Image (cartoon, helix red, strand yellow):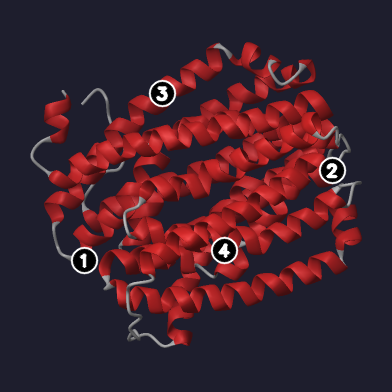
Amino acid sequence: MLSRLLGENNDVKELLFKSASFFIIKSFGFLSGYIFVLIISNLFGATVNGYVAMSFSIFLIGSIIPRLGFDINLVKMFSSKSFGEAKYYYKKSILISGLISLIMTIVGFALKRQFGSLLGIENLDYVTMGFLSIPLWTFTLINSAVLRGMKDTKWHSFLTNAGRFIFGLILLLTFYFGMDERGIAVPILSHTIGMAVLALASYILVYRRLKSIQSEKGDLETKSYIVDSAPLMFSSALILLLGWTDTIFLGVFDVASNVGIYHVVLKLVAVIGFSLQSMNSILAPKIAKSYYTGDQETFNKLLQTVVKINFYFSIGLMLVLILFRDPILLLFGEEFLGGSTLLVILCVGQLTNTICGPVGVVFQMTGQQKTFQNLILIAFLINLTLNFLLIPTYGIYGAAISSIVGMSFWNLAGVFIIQKKHDILLIYNPFK
């Protein structure tokens, strides 16, 4: 079966083997993230875990604006243009994003009480650390995009997945057990310092790869570069908002302990998307290259391989989560058993992602970012409306239903559009 899947296509072989290493690194990061949340849940409780979730939402959503879609555009540039020209745009990206993120951090500091009141965060250190993390995460993601475009997927995976939790976990354990620092703000302080270390590491990695490359002025002026990147920013922003709007609404309409339970369950369910995320990191530059060079055979083969592997891996992971949900949730504490039914609902909702392939990657790497942006915008509006209607009455279950409906819409609609445009179906049929 493996030989049939690999065939003679070197791009497909590289996709599978590099995805395997990416999967291992991401699994390590995923495990670190769970241990981080597990320790917080057991030592500080669901309420503090809820504060952590809201602080994460501040920097994860806030960092979208200063990036302006540069991180995604840089993947394409380092894949399809000379490194010298790509470096020119990288330097512009760092300058523009750094300035915007700094302004956002200053504004966030000034309005921390208002944000704390809005998001239901009583300890304002979680608001402050959230805004302080915006430039750190922005810097890290732009640098990791360069590494991804240069096909250094191992370091890209570490920077975007494992790094912040590994450093944060080490610091949390050091503060709590080594220095006997057990204040309520210790978890988010540990994470923020870890983010600073990660941002510095990302700079060193990129500097070593680009220092010998002479920067070459590109054809696009700064304004045109921003305009070209903006649709990618909007798509990324809306996707992230789709994943965090329910958590934010819960913070506004529900108690922090329920936000903490929902956050843990979401992290558990995220494991179902492991295989697709692992392959997407390798797939993106290959899709861009095969599309723009007119290599339709490789284009189709890559997508067919990803769709098939993703289906079987995701189904297997989903069944494990559902069958062993109570013992897994009990690891975080007895109060998290209240998320058992929620976990089943969200797992079933992930079926859409399970049967659909890399919809977003295909749109973004083939110049259809505006189409993708419009799809995500509609899905976001659906999600936003349902959150507003359902969460005040149904709480965490209303949040789950809202998330599932929005995600299913853009995935299925995207599959339909891609089939019409590229004549390839991104849904795997195991009975065919």
Where is mark 1, residue-wise? 292
Q: Is residue 109 above or below residue 281?
A: below
Which one is earlier in the sequence, the residue at label 1 or at label 3? Answer: 1
* Pointer 4 or 2: first along the chain: 4
Mark 4 and mark 3: Cα distance apart in space: 35 Å
**Disc number for residue 139:** 4
Q: Earlier in the sequence, mark 1 or mark 4?
A: 4
Residue type at mark 1? Answer: Tyr
| Mark 1 surroundings within 10 Å by alpha-carbon count, few (fewer than 14), some (14 through 19), many (20 or more) | some
- Please state the horizontal and vertical placement of residue 228, each as a whole percent of the image: 42, 76
Question: 134 or 404: nearer the eye?
Answer: 134
SS assignment at label 2: loop
**What residue does disc 2 label?**
185
Q: Residue sitting at 62 percent across and 55 percent down?
A: 381
Left or right of 200? Residue 119 is right
Please name the amino acid that badge 4 sits on: Phe
For marks 1 and 2, the one nearer the N-term is 2
